[in-house]
Image (spheres, helix red, strand yellow):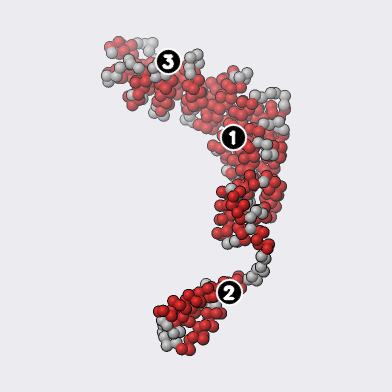
Amino acid sequence: MDGLHALAGEKWCFGALPLLISWLRQYLAAGHALTGPADQAVARLEVLEEHPLLLAPFLCAWSGSGGVATSKLALAALLRVVPQHPALRQHLLALFVHALRQPGAPADLRQALLMHAIPALVSASDAYATARVVAFIADLWRQGRDNARISGMAVRAWAQAVRRNARVWRDLHPIVAQLAEHKKARTVVVAAEYEWAVLTTARDLVLWDAERYAEHVLPIAYALLRYVDTLSASSTALMIEAVRLCVEAGAADVRGAWAVAEAAVARWGTQDTQVLRQAGLLMACVGRGGDGTEVYAAFRQRVLMDTVAPLGPDMDWVLAAFPADEITSLITETPTQAVVHASAELMAARMDHEVRFMRRTALRGRAGQAATTEPAPASWAQANAARCEWLTSALDSPVQRACEQVWGGSGPGFALAALVGGSNGGMAQAQVLVGGASLADHWTLRCAAADAWQM
């Protein structure tokens, strides 16, 4: 302990070293030992997190009894203390890079360091630490040009840094745009693994904040979908998904987006499920969207008839996004077949439409409707009158039997008149029976007023 105190007072001891020595003295003074298995020491995180620099030796303790789990626990503890000690960012970066470059470092620890720990040191309030992290990632990307996996991981780490500080995007944007230029020019062979990493990054950016990054990502997506015929199915699906996310966020017009994606959808057709799935989600945006104009209604009908309908029953879930009155003509199955083959989304949409508009013929089936065609009522009043007549005929006998048991005599006439109000049958029966009525002030006479029963 005295030796540590004297060491901290030496002139050559500066920077973070005196702080480390001070924490080591406090740790030893509290009765904690540095000997023993590393995993047992890391288990006391509550104590070690009070002295974060003491966790540094355990980051490289993957060869101990605890294995790589000890290193991961120490890494997680170091990242937890960064918000409380912002000045440690630049020191932790040197520590992480040192552990990353060790020949014996496990692969999963290297991935955690590169994809999570190093980007986590980026902060919008610490420009110096952010610049050092970005410089390290950019240097790693340049060194890995001949290795698609290393360069792809560098781009993904760069994306995590952009998520924590949007200003980093100005350094990553040229790399994403460069890929699009290489694909259009067809002069540079781009490895598939690197291409997927870059395009996944573009998709993730609009997923995180479409309003901020749509103006940069959309031109790249449009160029790849429109001009690159050799784009792979996975890359096509990623770009269609990026366009759809922009449409759902209101950062892109659905008609322009579909005009670009339509060629790619036609090129792949039903050959790839990823493209078909993303195209279906974009077509669902077309069905749900609209500004109420005839121009958009014609556009939606064209997409429905030219693209959705030819895909068959496998795309019933896309039909659910379109208005029910527009898809009725496409559903020609009998009710039993419709229930068996239709998707849950389509059945839910049709049932919701039935509940709101009560158009029962859509669920009965068009075949049954054509076989028993009946003239539609001329107006709502005539239809309501027909329902009242049916109600009168249905309630006549049971109401009479019930009222005869209670009142007897002419009571059924008053009761029926009170129930059916303005219907012709009920009023006629009331007029016949009212002559023999002796209950002039009965409640049935009061309730039989037309205003009380008419809507």
Other-residue count near label 2 (Cα within 10 Å), few / some / many at <14 / 14–19 / ≥20: some
The residue identified by callout 3 is: 63
Q: Quadrant of the N terminus?
A: top left
Numbered disc in front, either 3 or 1: 3
What's the CA distance linking mark 2 and mark 1?
Answer: 59 Å
Establish if 97 lies above or below 244. Answer: above
Establish if 313 lies above or below 144. Answer: below
Disc assigned to residue 385: 2
The three-letter code of the residue at mark 3 reads Ser
**Foreground pick, 180 / 167:** 180
Disc assigned to residue 361: none
Element assignment for label 3:
loop
Residue that extends furthest to the bottom in the rendered view of this protein:
435
The residue identified by callout 1 is: 203
Mark 3 and 1 residues: CB-CB less than 8 Å, in contact?
no
The three-letter code of the residue at mark 1 reads Arg
Other-residue count near label 3 (Cα within 10 Å), few / some / many at <14 / 14–19 / ≥20: some
Numbered disc in front, either 2 or 1: 2
Element assignment for label 1:
helix
